[in-house]
Image (spheres, grey):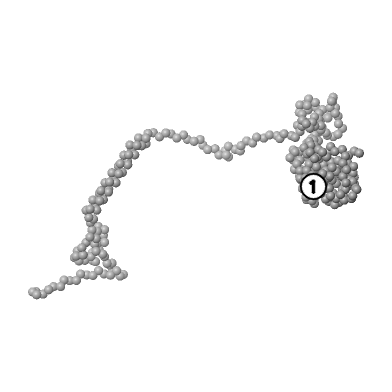
Amino acid sequence: MAGRTETPAPMPRPRSGRSGSRPAFPEPFGGAPEAASRRNIGNDPSYLRPSRLPPRPPRTRRLEVILTGGGLFLLLTVVWSWWAQGGSSRLAPATPVPTPPPAVTVAAMGPPAVPTATPKPPIEFSFARFESDPAIVTGAPSAGVPNISGEAGIIVDVTQREVLYAKQPHKQMLIASTTKIMTAMIALDHAPIDRVFVVPPEATRIDPDNTVMGLATGEQLSLEELLYGLMLNSGNDAAEAIAYGVGGGGAAGRARFIGWMNEKAATLQLRNTRFANPSGLDDPAHYSSPYDLAVMGTALLGYPDLRTIVRTPRKIIESSKVPGRVHGWFGPV
């Protein structure tokens, strides 16, 4: 109708993003605002499909082609370089690697052999002489061989460490005061010779029939003085005073001292020796053999102080408790 202006229908507004409604969409990439006004974007679900995204510009496609071609060229160059330098060696037959021998475990091999050797005895037996003259072993009388009446005995060349004569040399027997050889050595193994000891009452409780040095309870004597009374007069009281004093005092000290005696017997390879007291009183658990006693006597010669004591002909020891009293004239007058 002339003179009448038509008002265009308003564009439908995008619905809000509230629950149950479609979300609002932005403008298409690369699209113009007026293009969006010609389409009802809100009513076109296909807009969400990736295939409907705007096409990429030609410049982007050219850049992708260039990059793809350059990468392929670089890959071919690397492959050709590798083939020219090391490809031929790759085709060569591989050198066979020798197969290592199977591992052997320690359990399969077993424990290593330990060489065994019989320890050399402290004093050697002259086996050649034993074989040539049976009397050396049996003690039977023969020319040049003594016939001893004792139950057992031994003669040793200390310089050569050789047995010259033996009669039941390994028989276990009561050894009485020869025990004091070991007592003296243990005393010097564990105490200086000038140490002073107080005589305990236990050391004076000795049977009157025993040989004694004549000690009194509370008397003070050096170990050297006690050793003179032990070795020259065979004093049982001196042996007990040494065992109590050197062992540390009390019954435990005495037991400790006797333990040291047996330990040294094992060190000297005395296979038929056992000590139960320091003086040599008879006891079924106290014994030795002629051979073991010979070894002990030889060992004693390695103590200079004891060598001096045993070769002293005479010694006077005064009492520290009673002035003017002496314990005896040890040795010959």
Above or below 235: residue 141: above
- Secondary element under disc 1, as helix, strand or loop, is loop
At a point 88% along the width and 43% down the height, the residue shown is 316
Name the side, left or right, on which 66 lies relative to 297. Answer: left
On the image, which quarter does residue 333 sit in?
A: top right
From the image, which quarter does the N terminus lie in?
bottom left
Circle 1 is placed at which residue position? Answer: 195
Q: Position of residue 68 (x, y in %)?
A: 27, 48
Q: Position of residue 64 (x, y in %)?
A: 26, 50
| Kind of residue indicated by mark 1 | Arg
Q: Residue furthest front?
A: 324
At a point 78% along the width and 43% down the height, the residue shown is 188
Q: Position of residue 51 (x, y in %)?
A: 25, 57
Q: How many marks?
A: 1
Residue density around tag 1, few if under 14, some if 14–19, many if 20 or more, within 10 Å: few
Name the side, left or right, on which 242 lies relative to 60. Answer: right
